[in-house]
Image (cartoon, rainbow, N blue to C red):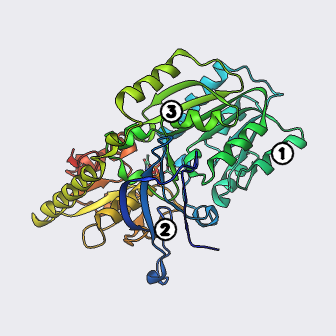
Amino acid sequence: MLEYEVIPGCRSCGAAPLETVLSMGEMPLSDGLVRPGGDLSSEQMYPLTLVRCPQCSLVQILETVPPETLFGKDYPYYSSFSDVLVDHARRNVETILDRYPLTDESLVVELASNDGYLLQWFAKERIPVLGIDPAPGPARAAEERGIPTICDFFTPELADRLVSEGRQADVIVGNNVLAHVPDQNRFVAGIERLLAPGGTVVMEFPYVRDLIEHREFDTIYHEHHCYFSVTSVKNLFARQGLDLVRVEHLPIHGGSLRATFQREGRPAPEVDEYLRQEEAYGLNDADFYADFAEAVNETRVRLVELIDQVMKDGSTVAAYGAAAKGAIMLNYCKIGVERLAYVVDRNIHKQGWLMPGVHIPIVGPDRLATDPPDYLLILAWNFKDEIMRQQSAYSAGGGRFVVPVPEPVVL
Ligand code: JHZ
C-alpha cells in the first residue's frame, strides 16, 4: 500500500491546478499516538498542504493517507469523553425528532457513529438505529452500550447491501465525517442510495470561515481532507441529487455548520442568505485566504515566545487535551518534551501513550493535583470552558490556563 497519494485535482469538481493556502511541512498522523518503549525513529511523517480549488472554491489538503492507516485498530478518539459534545448530540437528536416524525418503524443511520454517543439518544426514544464506523475500538464501545454497529467504511456498496436487506434510512446523520472521506462524491452517492423516499440527511462539519477567521490551523490534518463552506457543500450534494434545505451555524468544535439535505427539497430562506453572505464576504475568492499563512505563523511565534518567557521566569508548563488538533499544534510549533512535562487527557485509551511526533507522555487528570504545572496549555481549546470548569481546583491553587488560538492568551 502506498504511504500517501497526492490528488491530481479538486476532490469535489476535479479542476486543476489547485492554489496553495498553507504549507505545513511534514506532520505526523494527528491521532497516531506512539507506544512508549517502541522504535520512536520509525514514526512516519507526511507532508501536509492546504489548498483551494479556484473553480468550486473547496478548501482541501493535497495529500491522501489511506483511510485504513488513519482509522486503524488503535484509533484513539472516543466522542463520549466530552460532556459538552454528548449534550450537543442530545440536543441535535431532540431537534431532529421535533422536525421529522420518526417512529419505532423508522431507521436512523449514523455514519461515523463512534462510540454511540449520539445514537444512544434515538435509542432511548425507542427509534431503531444503526451505526457505521470503521474504527474497531469505538465501534465495540457502541455495541457495548447496545447500539448495533457495522464496523466498516461507508461506501455505495455498503449502502446497496443495506437497501437490499430492507434497511433504507429515514434519517442519515453524519457528524464530523464528511471531511474524513477522501472521495467525497462516492460517499455522498452512497448516502443518496441509502436514503429512504422522503428521508432527510443531517451533516455537521467545521466551517471553513471559522477556521480562517479564528486561525484554527491545528484543525488541518490528514484525517480532514476537506474544509467546507455552505457553497461548496451545497454543490457537492447537489451533484448527487440532494438539495440543501437548512443551514445552522453552531459553536461546537470552534464553529461548525449543520446542513440538512433532502431530495427535491425546498430550501429555507436562510440557505440563500448564507450563500449570499459567503459571496459578499469573499469566501469564494483567493483574497480571503491570502493572509492566512502569515497569521498562522504569527500565532506560532507568539505561542512559543509566551511559553519560553514563563519558563525563563522559572515556571513549569504542561498541556491539556491529547486531541488530534493538539498533535498538530505541538508539531507545527515544535513544542516538545523540553517545554511540556506532560499532556493530560480524560480518555483512558490515550493515557500511557505518547503524543505523535513530539512524544510527550499522555497522563490522566489526577496528575494536575499531584504535580501541577504553573501554566496549562489547553490544546483542546474548543472545550476550554468545560475543561476550566472541571479544573477549578487547579486554578484555585494558582494554576493559569493558556489558550493558543486565535492568539495565545493567558486566562
Ligand atoms: P477534540 C476530534 O478532533 C476527532 P480532536 C475528529 N478528527 C474530528 O473530526 C474532530 O474531533 C471534529 C479530551 N478531553 O474533541 C478528549 C478531556 O480530556 O477537541 C479528547 O482527547 N477532558 C474525528 O481530537 C480531547 O480532549 C475534557 O474535559 O482534535 C478533545 O479532543 C474534554 C472536554 C476533553 O478533538
Residue most extreme to the left: 313
**Residue in the foreground of this view, choosing between 335 and 137:** 335
- Pick whichever, 272 or 200, lies toward us: 272
**For residue 294, above or below residue 167:** below
Q: Nearer the viewer, mark 2 or mark 1?
A: 1
Q: Which residue is mark 3?
A: 231
Q: Position of residue 83 (x, y in %)?
A: 49, 41
- Compared to residue 250, the image places residue 112 above or below, namely below
Question: Where residue 263 appears, x then y in whole percent?
Answer: 72, 26
Disc assigned to residue 33 = 2
Quadrant (top left/top right/bottom left/bottom right) for the C terminus: top left
> Disc 3 versus disc 1: distance between alpha carbons?
29 Å
Dot 2, crowdedness within 10 Å: few (<14), some or many (≥20)? many
Q: Note whether residue 403 is visible.
A: no
Snapshot quadrant of residue 364: bottom left
Q: Residues within 10 Å of mark 3 (few under 14, many from 20)?
A: many
| Amino acid tagged 3 | Thr
Contact between labelled residues 1 and 3, with CB atoms less than 8 Å apart: no
The residue mark sitting in front, 3 or 1, is: 3
Q: Nearer the viewer, mark 3 or mark 2?
A: 3
Q: Report x, y in % for residue 373.
A: 25, 60
Pointer 2 or 1: first along the chain: 2
Of pointers 3 and 1, the one earlier in the residue sequence: 1
- Could you tell me which residue is drawn at 65 percent across and 46 percent down? 185
Q: State the image coordinates of residue 42 (x, y, percent, origin top left).
A: 48, 82
Q: Residue at x 29, y 61 (%)?
A: 318
Residue type pointed to by label 2: Leu
Residue pictured at 37% horizontal, 70% vertical: 360
- How far apart in space, not on screen, are marks 2 and 1 (Cα)? 35 Å
Q: Which mark is residue 160?
A: 1
